[in-house]
Amino acid sequence: MNDKNEKCKMLNQEIMSCLPAMAYAKEHLEEIIESAYQNCVRKVYSTGEVESVSLINHRVIGGYKRGRVLKSIPEDSDYCETGYDSSGRPLYCKSVNIYKTEMTSFWFDFDGDTYVMEMELRTLTKLYRKVRTPRITKYRFDAKGRVLFYANIDAPNFQPDDYSHFGRAIANVYEYPDDETQPIICYFYDYVTHLDENGNTKNPEDTQYYETLYEITSDLKTITEYRHDGEGGWKLSRQIVSGTKKSAKPKAAPDSAEKFAAWLDRELEQDIPLSGGIYFDLFSPTEDGFGIYFSVTEDFDPDDDDWACNVSYCSDNMFMVNTNGAMEWDAAIKTAAKLIRGYLKTGLHRDVLRRYDGIGTAFSDGDIDYICIK
């Protein structure tokens, strides 16, 4: 599909296909909500939202992310509650601000696809009476459970006297090769179309349309981005997440080890549990660096990464590792591990740290790097 008109037509069909799903959600609202809460077997409280199944949305352009896991519901800060069923599938994701206004996304199936729809608790007595926005997220999977189509879609919200609304799709379409050692290809579309007075889209020439191609290695660790050159070809843009770069790699500031030691000294001087495991939760890299949270877990099991979610203590303050540019995730993990190992050798309270069953660090959605295991 090299023709822009054909691609816009395809994306417009995806947008319009969400309207019946939205109508279904409104008609079966109470049923969807009741089913989500009845089938929930595990709740996770966090500072973020449940992560997206889309590699591109999650790792490159943002999207849903679990964030730092909390021990319990905080009384004076924003938080998120995510409910999962027995198979680990998310059922709902509730974001609550300090004013106790709830915005909840519920998962439901319709016509062979999986959808997530945002709803809002308007009052304590009228449960989700009004849809907060016309935004809906659509998923499509293959027989192996791999995502084939993922889109955040602002479906049109028609009003009798207002036709200013528009449909927008930020969509990812994946192509999986038969040879699983070969890269996965993902086409990313950012598509906006305005509607006429009859609720129909205008001509494709009147749309905003952006296209990017991502080549994802089979181990899912390296994503190479290409931008469409407007002439039927692709131009290399950047490499994301991991992989080798010829340019100078971002490094931690020279005084990072000293500042990290002082920060961890203060954390280990708090009234913290003295058994279980230690987990250093890493916060997404930015152009300025990345963050580290310190937490004590109730138990430690290197064969079960969920031990990092069983938090009995979390630091209130995040330590920021300043860098001269955005680090890739692998580099950030290695930098954090180096800081922790350095503290275990020379830190003021290294003996306190060594009494735990094990120490690990990771981003909240990644594999744990184990610093030490008793």
Image (cartoon, helix red, strand yellow):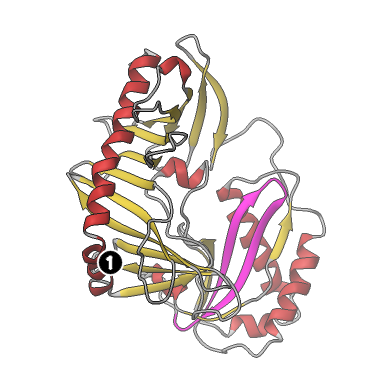
Task: Name the quarter where the N terminus is drawn.
Answer: top left
Kindly tell me whether residue 181 is visible in this rendering: no
Q: Main secondary structure of the magenta part?
A: strand
- The quadrant holding residue 10 is top left
In the displayed structure, does residue 160 sit left or right of residue 246? left
In the displayed structure, does residue 18 sit left or right of residue 326? left
Q: Residues within 10 Å of mark 1 (few under 14, many from 20)?
A: many
Instruction: State the residue at coordinates (33%, 35%).
Output: 15
Asked if the magenta segment contains residue 282, the reply would be yes
Residue 158 location (% of width, % of height): 37, 40
Instruction: State the residue at coordinates (74%, 67%).
Output: 260
Q: Secondary structure at mark 1?
A: helix
- Provide the residue span drawn in magenta: 277-299
Given the image, on which type of amino acid does mark 1 rest?
Answer: Ile
Residue 39 location (% of width, % of height): 23, 71
Q: From the viewer's perspective, is residue 172 above or below residue 41?
A: above
Q: From the viewer's perspective, is residue 125 above or below residue 156?
A: below
Outermost residue, top side = 231
- The quadrant holding residue 76 is bottom right
Outermost residue, front side = 161
Viewer-closest of 162 and 167: 162
Asked if the magenta segment contains residue 165, the reply would be no
In the displayed structure, does residue 260 sit left or right of residue 293? right
Instruction: State the residue at coordinates (69%, 80%).
Output: 267
Viewer-closest of 55 and 345: 55
Residue 355 location (% of width, % of height): 58, 85
Residue hosting label 1: 33
Kindly tell me whether residue 330 is visible in this rendering: yes
